[in-house]
Image (spheres, rainbow, N blue to C red):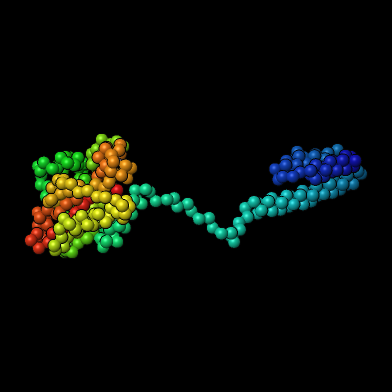
Amino acid sequence: MLDQIQAVKTRALAELAAIVDLDELETWRIQHLGKKGTITQLLRGLGQLSPADRPRVGQAANEAKQALEAALAARREALEAARLAQALAAERIDVSLPGRSPRLGTRHLISRTVREICDVFVAMGFNVVEGPEVEWDHYNFEMLNIPPDHPARDMWDTMYIGEVGAPMLLRTHTSPVQARYMETHQPPIRIVVPGKCYRYEDVDATHEMMFYQIEGLAVDTDITLADLKGVLDRFARALFGPDRKTLFRCDYFPFVEPGVEMAIDCHMCHGAGCKLCKGTGWLEIMGAGVVHPKVLEGVGYDPAKYSGFAFGMGP
Ligand SMILES: [Zn+2]
């Protein structure tokens, strides 16, 4: 019996020495010190011994049990310390490292173009202002000399908020900001208005339901078509290069009189005619004109005293 106790103890300690994780350690504990464990079985067997042998064997069995319990506690402590050290090493944070800067991306091509265009006009003394995209018919059409049933309304395929002809709509151009601005400011006025516009379009390579426009307006005493040409010539050269030629031709917009369209000489063929300019040598870049006296009257300006020019382009 004493040999058996010694054998169990030796085997259990050898197994314990090979254990490397806490789960295995628990299995070992159940196997040797649990209710049905080897040591417990030995202690239960004491009852069958003679009273003379019982104390000696009992003491040996208890010593074996205590030895295994002590060894178990020591092993557990060592394994837990190892696990903690491993976790600390794996989750170590070096607070002295420099931070990671977030990826910012880049500005969209349209945003860049809008800024570039506005910068040219800002350099000539214009201010950048903005207005609402959901607009009243009043500002989008009526204040721009386009009353209800005016045939020019067909120039814009309007998206209304509600049914067709409703008083509220998605602005079809940035021009309503002209009227809004003049209502609340007195001349001299020099503004550019970038923003989104909406029209019910068949979408193709050159048409979209939502697109950008940049509007310009100057109102002062003695402003003429020559001022418009001077400003837009300078703009074209600033944006498209100092050698750019410009061309102004008659066009019609209800809110200007006279109205013009402006073109620059084609940068692909330099005026000779190619596919890009459809053989004309010119590329149309915007509509413009001298502000219609009715528009000035509508915002309370005296057309005999003030005049102005306006222009609009798609960036
Ligand atoms: Zn061309």
Q: Is residue 43 left or right of residue 310?
A: right
Q: Is residue 43 left or right of residue 242?
A: right
Quadrant of the rendered image containing residue 210: top left
Residue 41 visible in this rendered orientation of the protein: yes
Q: Residue furthest front?
A: 272
Residue 217 visible in this rendered orientation of the protein: no
The percent coordinates of residue 290 (x first, y second) are: 15, 54
Above or below, 119 against 141 in this view is below
Q: Along the line of sight, which residue is nearer the eye, 21 or 112?
A: 112
The percent coordinates of residue 220 (x first, y second) are: 16, 62
Quadrant of the rendered image containing residue 278: top left
Q: Residue furthest right?
A: 52
x 80%, y 39%: residue: 38
Q: Is residue 54 left or right of residue 71?
A: right
Quadrant into which the N terminus falls: top right
x 9%, y 59%: residue: 303
Q: Along the line of sight, which residue is nearer the eye, 275 or 256?
A: 275
